[in-house]
Amino acid sequence: MGFKSINPTNGECLKEYTTHSEEEVHHILEKAEISFLNWKISPLSFRENLLKKVADLLEEKIDDLSKLITLEMGKPIVQSIAEIRKCALVCRFYAQEASTFLADHTIQTEASSSKVRYLPLGTILGIMPWNFPFWQVFRFTAPALMAGNNVIIKHAPNVPQCSLAIVDIFEEAGAPIGLVQNVFAEIEQIPSIVIHDTIQGISLTGSDRAGSAVASLAGKHIKKCVLELGGSDPFIVLKDADIKQAAYFAARSRMNNSGQTCIAAKRIIVEAEVVDQFTAIFLEEISQMKVGDPLEESTNISCMARPDLVENLERQIKESIEMGAQFILEGGRKEPNSNWVLPSIMHHVHIDMPIMKEEVFGPLAVIVTAKNAKQALRLANENIYGLGASVWTTNEKLALEMADQINAGFVAVNSMVRSDPRLPFGGIKRSGFGRELSKNGILEFVNEKTIVVS
């Protein structure tokens, strides 16, 4: 099939790459194995310096790299710039904190010495998505490298230039040969890579279907994996919340990256007493957002990344309307057969509709009315996913009680869900398992080795 870099705004093919052959894949794995033998014994100071140089290069090249993101998958340029900055941030974070995170942990026992050491596993395969083509790679690569592992990136087929650019940055920063590599592999090639002896762990960000397939294979071959999968995040607005502020952030959470974000506010659950007020302000916020050229800094919402994504969104809307859902704001495609989709808002929904039970990727917001806080909590948990959630209320005690009861890996009170290098990030249920970022993230792919001296 090959890997095509296609500008989603106009369908122009920017570049095309040939799928790696079986022999080429084998050579990539061989280089990774050799690289790991040296990297695992490298001083932490050497790894720190590499990540600092990478961060510097990301910031030096921010204009070109952010433009590349926008050209390959359509992200508004301001958001692409923010993505590159965040990648530099995570590199500097692990360069600074890894020595603390990986320090030996001494435990008092009757032995003269008992300690836990954190040692690298080997080569980690990263199966990455297109919606944050730099950030998703860096948030697993930075901690993996600092722990002494090396990585192979199997990126999404529509962002091949981003994947190659990441490898180039590491090479320019002085990374040893084979430390960070790209593989152009088709879906049918992935199983043979996953089970290869060189691969000691898999980090996958993507759909729950992809996660299930990879986790099954990893489990069969006894390999560690971390899965960050889909989300249908609830955004709960209670009657005592700051309604204007909640509506402002709900709009930005839902329409970030043109609605193509795992942690977007996908189910906006509002108490009945304030739902009309909230909806009016939310509608105004969405209506004021500019849909346009992603290379213009004034653009808030751009096109969707691929035609198949648009088609799936249209299916979800059509089937939900047939089940009784109604538009508050009807958007849809600007032109037939294009990737340009105007924002929509829907209500009169129930949990069996596709726009409620499936992950929705695209500029569609769903508003759900709840009788009270108790029903809002129940509605929030009536979903197969458990990635993030938001609760908006001035009652901190109630907010914390609800945060404990919401089935999610991350709950934000009076703010939108966003990842932070200092905080663990990941989900439960069909949103996956394992954690990225923070100390938790760097310890996912290490051997926690106990050493006892009598």
Image (tube, rainbow, N blue to C red):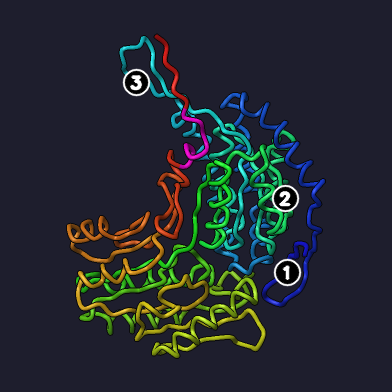
Nearest the camera: 199 or 256? Answer: 199
Disc 2 from disc 1: Cα separation? 19 Å
Q: Is residue 377 depicted above or below 41 in this figure?
A: below
Count residues near mark 1 (Cα–Cα under 10 Å), then give few for <14, some for 14-19, many for 20+.
many
Task: Give the alpha-carbon distance from disc 3 to disc 2, as whole Å.
Answer: 42 Å
Q: Quadrant of the C terminus?
A: top left
Q: Position of residue 174 (x, y in %)?
A: 71, 35
382 relative to 344 in the view: left or right: left
| Disc ID at residue 6 | 1
Local SS, label 2: loop
Residue labelled with disc 3? 107
Question: Counting residues from the N terminus, which is met first, the one under dot 2 or under dot 1?
Answer: 1
What amino acid is found at the position of numbered circle 2 in the picture? Val
Left or right relative to 238: residue 37: right
Q: Residue at x 46, y 80 (%)?
A: 288
Pointer 3 local density, CA inside 10 Å: few below 14, some 14–19, many at least 20: few
Q: Where does the magenta region start and end?
A: 441-448
Q: Earlier in the sequence, mark 3 or mark 2?
A: 3
Identity of the residue furthest to the front in this view: 220
Q: Which mark is residue 183?
A: 2
Residue 34: x percent and y percent? Answer: 72, 31
Three-letter amino acid code of the residue under disc 1: Ile
